[in-house]
Amino acid sequence: MKKPTQHHDDRRNSVSEDYARAVKAPASSCCCTPVPKGAVAKLAGYTDAQIAALPAEAVVNSFGCGNPLAFSKVKAGDVVLDLGSGAGIDLLLAAKKVGRKGKVIGVDMTTAMIAKARKNIAAAGLTNVEVRKGIIEKLPVESGSVDWVISNCVINLSPEKERVFAEIARVLKPGGRMLVSDIVADDLPAGIAKYRRLYSSCLAGAIGEKAYLAGLRKAGLVEVAVKDRIVYDASQIEAFIGSELSDAGSGCCAGPPGRLAKRWAPRLAGKVASVKVAGRKSSKAIARR
């Protein structure tokens, strides 16, 4: 496995800075956030009942592309690990599923996100949730210690996805499962990677679906499959890119969707998707520390 480079660290730092700025921005902010604040909670599979039962701060500061618990069989007593747990919406939902005898662990690299999550956990009155600071390429979690790994639109942000996949396999108990929501994309234009906002917005760092699944299998997981898929059309992609990128002025709110958005959207139509990916660690696997 390749060793981390300064470029990888720089990429992680820029993502962390963008999300720290986003979580501090007003809920009505129209720009300069990775994704519209609270949009995932309304559009990505969370029910009205789930949203109503959560602290408002957890919902409005939700950044993601799906509900990774929607198709899971998380049960009472399980240990659940959330990669890139953010402000904690999935931590809170998982905590209700596992109950008092279970445990939920969140890992995030952004101090502002961790503080927000802990505030939301306290507001929800939960005692079975813990948030740890760390990176998903080197999880501060014991090997073979969790029943479920979940994540919501975070792995695409990693510049070292192979390390993330290996860490998922390491921390799962034999027979443990993963279910993550993420963005995948094929044949992205090379020039898109230079736009920092588009990387933090879960687009520029995305890899193809086949490569994603192959990476998980290479890490040793079995029964790897896509359980749900939403493919974005040109209008959705243009709106998404346009909200993050403007060529009219210097600021991200300086004008209407730019020429680049209009040029790229037709090329990306049908190539970018939100997916739910499942996998399992073999019950014969030996956990490594």
Image (cartoon, rainbow, N blue to C red):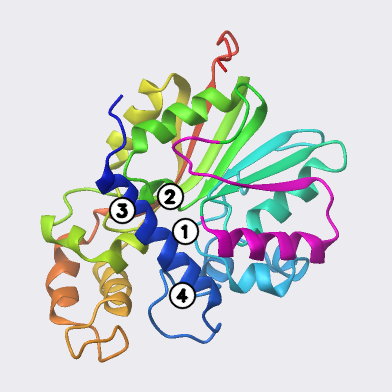
Label 4: which residue?
Answer: 36
Q: CA distance from mark 3 to mark 2?
A: 22 Å
Label 3: which residue?
Answer: 10
The residue drawn where x is 81% and y is 33% is 77
Asked if labels 1 and 4 touch by Cβ distance under 8 angstroms, the answer is no
Label 2: which residue?
Answer: 182
User: Amino acid type of disc 2?
Assistant: Asp
| Image coordinates for residue 101, horizontal then vertical, percent | 86, 36
Q: Is residue 204 left or right of residue 137?
A: left
Task: Tell me if residue 73 can be seen.
Answer: no
| Image coordinates for residue 256, horizontal then vertical, percent | 25, 89
User: Amino acid type of disc 4?
Assistant: Pro
In magenta segment, residue 118: yes
To which quarter of the image does residue 234 belong? bottom left
Total numbered labels: 4
Asked if labels 2 and 1 touch by Cβ distance under 8 angstroms, the answer is yes
User: Amino acid type of disc 1?
Assistant: Cys
Label 1: which residue?
Answer: 65
Q: CA distance from mark 4 to mark 1?
A: 11 Å
| Image coordinates for residue 5, horizontal then vertical, percent | 27, 40
**SS category of the residue bearing label 3:** helix
Callout 2: 10 Å neighbours few (<14), some, many (20+)? many
| Image coordinates for residue 83, horizontal then vertical, percent | 54, 45
**SS category of the residue bearing label 2:** strand
